[in-house]
Amino acid sequence: MWKVSLAGWPLAHDLTAEAPPGFRPHWASPTVDSASPPSYEPAQEQSAEIILSFDIEEHDRIEAAAGLDIDPALKAHYRERLDTSTRWLLDELDRHEIKATFFVVGQIARHNPALVRAIHRAGHEVASHSWAHRRVHNLTPAEFREDVRLSKDALEQVTGKPVLGYRAPTFSIVRETAWALDILAEEGMAYDSSIYPVRHDRYGVPGAPRAPFLACGHRHSILELPLATLRVLGFNIPTGGGGYFRLFPLFMMEKTIRQAGRSSQPAVVVLYFHPWEFDPEQRRLPLRWRSRIRTYMGIKRTRGRLATLLSRHRFVRALEIAKRLDHQHATLPSWNVAGAT
């Protein structure tokens, strides 16, 4: 059964429905066994399209802070700093005439609608980063559906536009939570951008395709825009942003972009950042030493690095890619996230 967005174009399909005569759905095209990633024919060298995205959440919501007893005054400080750092990003993007996708925690639309409105009025895409920034692992399917609905509704109430994209907190759509893909499709999302094709102690689907693909849950499929990786000696190195942007030299992200242009089909790269990563003046969380290194190392050089990155490339919003690829579903690989190993 087709799912149709408010924009009027198809989003996802029922994997169990019988297709009409002569119709070849995208999931009937050659699929990829989940035990091994698909191999793409090398493309002619081209410039990769780069999706620039930001995950908008207060600093105390990060996974490293889970379980911490955070003082209310510190939480208030992070809420204030989120507004400051996000508006700094908006100014930088405006200066470079760049549009991006902002995955926003739905609760922010309730306590700071002016910030969400500013993002939207600047011409950026507003997408969902959940309602309360809880990992999908910690929700039942019913709770996850409600979380998606709350976030979608709150953001749409502020912007007046449909929210068609989703990114799970801490990239927590993995094999064990592949059922979430079904719910995203059923709730009218056009695409997901939660899958990181790497091995990591907190997230990752190591065998997933590195370029856009159709992610299959148990009943439906949905367009997946995976986070950027660099392929080195048969391994995927996470280079899409976040801590890797702070810890790795910038040339690794540049190499990732060039590699995608040469060998990925479609040639699309997804980069991601957080406002708090560009705010060295904010107070620091009381983290253990290993988490402190992961969280704060390199934070003083991020503004300069971002300025360099923005000056070197052109960027697009995720929804622009999703709309274009909607007409190319038959050419995209399908991959069974639920059966991933």
Image (cartoon, grey):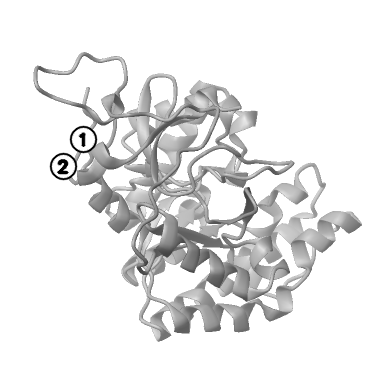
Other residues around mark 1 within 10 Å, as few (<14) / some (14–19) / many (≥20) = some
Contact between marks 2 and 1 (CB within 8 A): the answer is: yes
Is 125 displayed left or right of 297 in the figure? left
Give residue 256's position: percent from left, percent from top: 53, 64
Give residue 35's position: percent from left, percent from top: 55, 27
- Quarter of the image for the C terminus: give it: top right
Q: Residue at x 67, y 62 (%)?
A: 244
Q: Secondary structure at mark 1?
A: loop
Query: Above or below — where is 255 with respect to 260?
Result: below
**Disc 2 to disc 1, C-alpha distance:** 6 Å
Q: Which of these two is toward me, 275 or 159? A: 275
Please tell me the numbered disc located at residue 238.
Answer: none
Tell me which amino acid carries mark 2.
Gly
Total numbered labels: 2
Is 283 displayed left or right of 179 in the figure? right
Is 31 displayed left or right of 230 in the figure? left
Other residues around mark 2 within 10 Å, as few (<14) / some (14–19) / many (≥20) = few
Q: Residue at x 27, y 41 (%)?
A: 331
Tell me where residue 230 sits by quadrant.
bottom right
- Looking at this view, name the residue that lies furthest to the left: 21
- Quarter of the image for the N terminus: give it: top left
Give residue 298's position: percent from left, percent from top: 74, 73
Give residue 225's position: percent from left, percent from top: 42, 48
Q: Which of these two is toward me, 329 or 282? A: 329
Q: Secondary structure at mark 2?
A: loop
Residue indicated by mark 1: 4
Q: Which of these two is toward me, 168 or 67? A: 168
- Asked whether residue 281 is in view, the answer is no
Residue indicated by mark 2: 8
Q: Which of these two is toward me, 182 or 332? A: 332
Tell me which amino acid carries mark 1.
Val
